[in-house]
Amino acid sequence: MPGKLKAKIVAGRHLPVMDRASDLTDAFVEVKFGNTTFKTDVCHKSLNPQWNSEWFKFEVDDEDLQDEPLQITVLDHDTYSANDAIGKVYIDIDPLLCTEAASVISGWFPIYDTIHGIRGEINVLVKVELFNDLNRFRQSSCGVKFFCTTSIPRCYRAAMVHGFVEELVVNEDPEYQWIDRIRTPRASNEARQRLISLMSGELQRKIGLKVLEMGGNAVVGYLQCFDLEGESGLVVRAIGTACTLDKVSSGSAPNTNTHVHPNTAPASNACNSPSKDGKESPLAHGCRSTHNSPVHSVCSSQRLSQNFSVSVPTLIFTGMGSGGSAGKEAGPLKTLLRQHTQTALEQREFPFFTLTSFPPGFLVHVGGVVSARSVKLLDRIHNPALGNTRSYKLLDWNSVTADEPETRDAWWEEIRQEIKSHAKALGCHAVVGYSESTSICEEVCILSASGTAAILNPRYMREGCLDIGSTDHRFEDPSPPSCGFCHIPYDELNMPFPAQLTYCYHCRRQKVPDVLFTTIDLPSEAAVTGKGCLIQARLCRLKKKAQGEVNATAISNLLPFMEYELHTQLMNKLKLRNMNALFGLHIQISVGENMLLGLASATGVYLTALPAPGGIQIAGKTPGDLSNEHHILTIQKRINDTIAKNKELYQINPPKLFALDPEVFCGINMELTEEGLGSPIPEPRQRSRLFRSHSESSDELSELDLSHGKKDAFVLEIDDTDAVEDIHSLLTDAPPPTGFYSCNTEIMPGIYNWTSGIQMFTSVRVFRLSNANLTNQGLNKIFTDLCENLLKSFYFKLRSMIPCCLCHLNFTVAVPEEELIQVAVTAVAMTFDKDQAQEKPAEKPINKGSSENEEQLQFPLELCADVSSANTQPSSKVSGTVSLLTPAAKLCQNQLVMIHLPGVPESTNVSSRAASVDYGSFADRCSTWLELLRLKAHTIRRGSVKTSRRTQSLAHSVSSLERCSPLPEGRSRSLRSSRSFGGSSVTVVKMTPLSFLPGIRIIKYLGIINMFFIRETTSLREEGGVSGFLHSFIAEVFAMVRAHVAALGGNAVVSYSMKECVLMENPNKNQAQCLINVSGDAVICVRETDQEPTASMTNIGQTCCSANDGAT
Amino acid sequence: MAVELDVFVGNTTIMDEEVYQLWLDGYTVNDAVKVRMEGGVLDECEASADVLLSDTMDQYRTFQMCERLLHSPAKLANQLLFQIPPHRQTVLIERYYAFDDAFVREVLGKKLSKGTKKDLDDISAKTGVTLKSCRRQFDNFKRVFKVVEELKGPLVENIRQHFLLSDKLARDYAAIVFFTNNRFETGKRKLQYLTFQDFAFCAGQLINNWTVGAVDNMVEDMDVDLDKEFLQELKELKILITDKDLLDQHKSLVCTALRGKTKAFNEMEANFKNLSRGLVNIAAKLTNTKDVRDFFIDLVEKFIEPCRSDRWTAADMKLYLTHYTNSAHILDTFKHQVVWDRYMGVIKSCIFKMYHD
């Protein structure tokens, strides 16, 4: 399928002065694609040239279209000497290759130079015409859509999830070629940028081919990374989840029964949908998941040996406490069922999914975190002997050095096998929330992979789920969605590690672990008590400097201890916050020459289904010592106080209070009915849920109380100073200031009403350790302080957005040099409406998201119902569940009443007191917030009326300016319209690391943004030192991302992330270099105009927020 | 042990107006941190001094990067580097171009040359405005002056369009440009009591009435230079003081009108000839550039000071000037009514504005 690429250079603006004599520039443009180059005329003596060139046409293969970027170089014409380059623009034309995405690229692009940064802008138009070609052996994969988003993108529906795709490409790093000694830094940087652009293009194409082979039409959760291995080369690798996506037309979402044959749906939608050859792995039939098995988070890493690799033998159990009840029900049925599903997934090599959130019903059970690490030595032997002449040319690895990528492939293969076997040990057949990463220092490389072992509903992975839909339905998992995923997937009698199991506190029927760790986002349907919070474990370990194998051994010996300590810290901090589950767990271990850094981030929550965490008890080893005893007592008191404080802070009121408090109980009822009314069709599933929550809320009490006394406290022993330090560090984590919440997941559990104010930011800090002989403890403290101070800085900077939540806090640590620690953070601050924040998800911006998800699911469900015969009617399913449930429930209730009566008055007292306090402060906050809103609304009104009057005082009253900020806006607009040189042409582009924007609906995905930039300077001091240098570089990267999105016709970037930020500096030489890799999904979105009926309030809130939005 | 690098970059550029003001006022980072600490930001946000320092540094860096754009504000709306909401852009520009009255009073009417720039440290010491801030303000004046100098069209409108300033600020800049261009003397001891706003008002009057642009607004340089023809015509007014009859007639007309209406009548009557001579002489001399420069000092010396020493009230002044102007119309041998009105209109409002302590 060859195509014609057309490009037109329209104009330039704000060009730099290239000719000192005239203070002007004689600019012209070279447009290059592949080996073809066109030039525009020289536009003499202008800083704002108008070229208005003809259409430059390139006739090329689609393979090249996918691999190559369009390269635009702006030059200054010089009659006597060589032309000077002003800068370049690389345009990835991939988005144009997909019919559904953008159709034209048109807009102002910053002209970028690796030495000088952005130097003016250029206006370019790019189009592609593709010709159809039915070549079966094609190497291209045009039309496969890529998404960085790790969930099914909004406005799509997953017809099928095929599974894991991976690929890697290797090349020599131009920076390490001999030619680098003689070429300019600029040439070298550009060679690198271009090479990486080519390599990622190739990688994407190859992944696309795999997807087509699997029968999919899209890659979701696409994660591409670079390994800068230095002398041994450059690796670009990517993983993702292949899916078949159907577009959901925004208008008639849920009830599109028009697609009767889902098989044809993807075919018509995808621009070139795969032919379905029998290659599809025949997945199991008639599987269901009635399991109840316990789970825990296992994180282990095991040996991986190969010539130079060194193994990391560990099996770490994060499940603390022991014992565990033996379940009886886990009978043969369960194993049988598991076998079914397992065979289904085992057909695949790696049943991995890079997704972190799923359509409801997809995730059946979650086992726990599985992770594997391996230390490898990068060796030059693997490095191909390359001819220096092809510094730019991408190597054909099939012919020249097929060995190299294979080596890397083999490394990853080992790790993945490891992960797979861990998952199996947890009784799970799949791994979700899967990700891979590396950390490289000199020739040592740590490869890491982690994910969450899980059991999935295979319905999504089968072709023609229609036919088997009936069986699915009959054996529909009876666990309610709000707790089902917590139920253990493994065998109670044969647990993979010691864990304490209890009956689920939500449905009372199946076993749950006492703690649950996962790498995924909190499922939207999960029942949560209170709010969540960011929990971080930080750790530094010194190591001796060493070379080669010795070094690798030293590192791999340290790793298990680090993992163990990180997990202990996480567990302690979790208990300290009175929470019982971690989501979005991400553990990064970074290697430096003389130390290892470990940073684990996760979002802690109190899952209603899991038992309440016991407290932390301090025990001393030397009981005789009185002062010691006293010391322990004070620490114990502090810990208890902290726990109590955190309980209040995160509003963790254990569920029994809810159940006993009539008011709250009413609340639950209301909410449930509302939910029923809210959805277009009262789905049977929902009704059943409603019923269940009724019954369980009453029957919950019994066992809650029964288990009350025997809750095991978590014991910390103080036997040496280390332990004391640990406890101190435990207590030094400051909670976020009032009005702030933070989490590293997509959204904050417990907050449901986001307003539209968002602020995405990137922050980087580098800390220099000066005294040479630091202890581990000292290092830990420094590292902890560094992270804590960063967070404090964020809170301070974003204080104008309160109440707000920092979401998707993504910390990346590195040890760029011997005594440097670098922490880079990308996150988004989002405002929310404090009023409703206290209430449960009554109805909801987010639920909007989840309901959208439900739409995705409803389709197959409905189809099933339609096509399959009467016995699978939803109603029959419900009744079945009910009948199953009732006898047990009744029994429970009886017992409950008898056991409970004496205890009731007391607890009611407690609860009502708690409630009243809470509501008091809530009302208080409410009223102040209302006041604020009123005030703001007032100022806005006033401002608009008194425009002219106000302007008079503008220059003088600095403070009044602040108050009437909306006013200058109006004025400036009127002014600008009258201005001779056209008004602002810059589209506002929002950016967020999340997959959605609050209050805004994504209507179209325009393609993936994947950009790599290098910036170098030889005048570091003049640019304001490293901070000044990096500050402007990050700002430039943002600007280039925004410009590309705007040129595609988009107005937002979702799932934005900064994958790489490598900074090298040499202040003595006044030099610095930085590499940044960013990615995200370009989208078009519109404001959600069809707002809830709570109009007046929300509207005012929104006006304010949009003002705030701007203000921040 | 030190933080070697510390940056925070928002997709929407974060700017704190308080810090911006401190930056504009020429505070160093450390001083700014002190001021902010005293202002109590820390207490309301539970932050430490480190946090404040880091935040201030970040913001200062951002402002420094923005400064280049602020030099040609139109670029700010079109640039891609910083995503700044429009209303915030307006605030940035407006504040950047704002100036201290104390400072502008010192340089008003002076040549915006390197020499003046060298004296800025003296001005800084005298006014208490930091040298950095003085430089910014001075450079702003110079920049606006250079851009507008060559342009056609109304001065205020040109400034507003090129620098996207508010109407008020654009008018002030117009005054500065006008004063600079005509090199009006404003620094003499006797003029010290006048504020910049007094001068700005007068400049507005002169621009609107005495320049070429006031009559025909398609002429080059129209708003910056005084109307030469008009200045020539002003010579004709001399007849009011040279012709003895006319002078007496004028005096009697004015005195008749004033009698009984003010306590200062006697002084007015006694001083009439002197005052009239003063005003008409100013008019007649305006063809000399040197005398144009001394316009304000002449007004003060020849008219305001004598009146003040006779303890005229502002109302007296108003009354006197109104009748003085109007009576000239009744003089049948006086033919230069149009020029007289154009002259006296401005003189009247300037003197009203300038007649205070």
Image (spheres, rainbow, N blue to C red):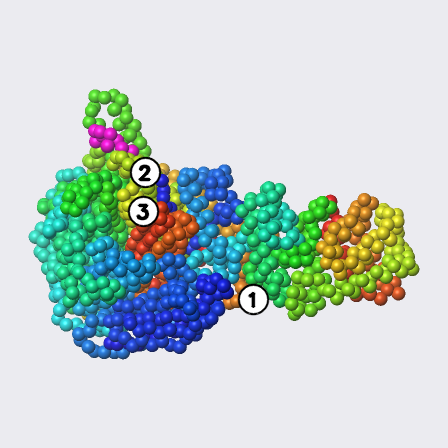
Identified at 35% across, 51% down, the residue is A1072
Q: In the rendered image of this protein, does residue B169 appear above or below residue A250?
A: above
Q: Nearer the viewer, residue A255 or A673?
A: A255
| Pointer 3 residue | A823
Q: Mark 2 or mark 1: which is in front?
A: 2
Looking at the rendered image, the quarter that the C terminus of chain B falls into is: top right
Give the x, y percent position of residue A766. Answer: 33, 45
Instruction: Give neighbour class at mark 3: few <14, some 14-19, many 20+ (Cα, 10 Å).
Output: many
Query: Can marks 3 and 1 be said to lie on one chain?
Result: yes
Q: Residue pushed farthest left?
A: A332
Callout 3 secondary element: strand
Q: Chain of mark 2?
A: A
Q: Residue at x 85, y 49 (%)?
A: B262
Q: Position of residue A651 (x, y in %)?
A: 33, 43
Mark 1 secondary-structure assignment: helix
Q: CA distance from mark 2 to mark 3?
A: 17 Å
Say which of A804 and A1012 sits in front. Answer: A1012
Amino acid identity at mark 2: Ser
Amino acid on which the number 3 mark rests in the picture: Val
Q: Which mark is residue A807?
A: none
Q: In this rendering, does residue A852 appear at all?
A: no
Report which quarter residue B164 is drawn in.
Answer: bottom right
Q: Quick one: label 1, few (<14), some, or many (20+) residues within 10 Å? A: few
Residue tagged by mark 2? A770
Give the image quarter of residue A154: bottom left
Q: What type is the residue that disc 1 sits on?
A: Ser
Residue span colored magenta: A717-728
Residue A978 marker: 1
Q: How many angstroms separate mark 2 from mark 1 (CA)? A: 58 Å
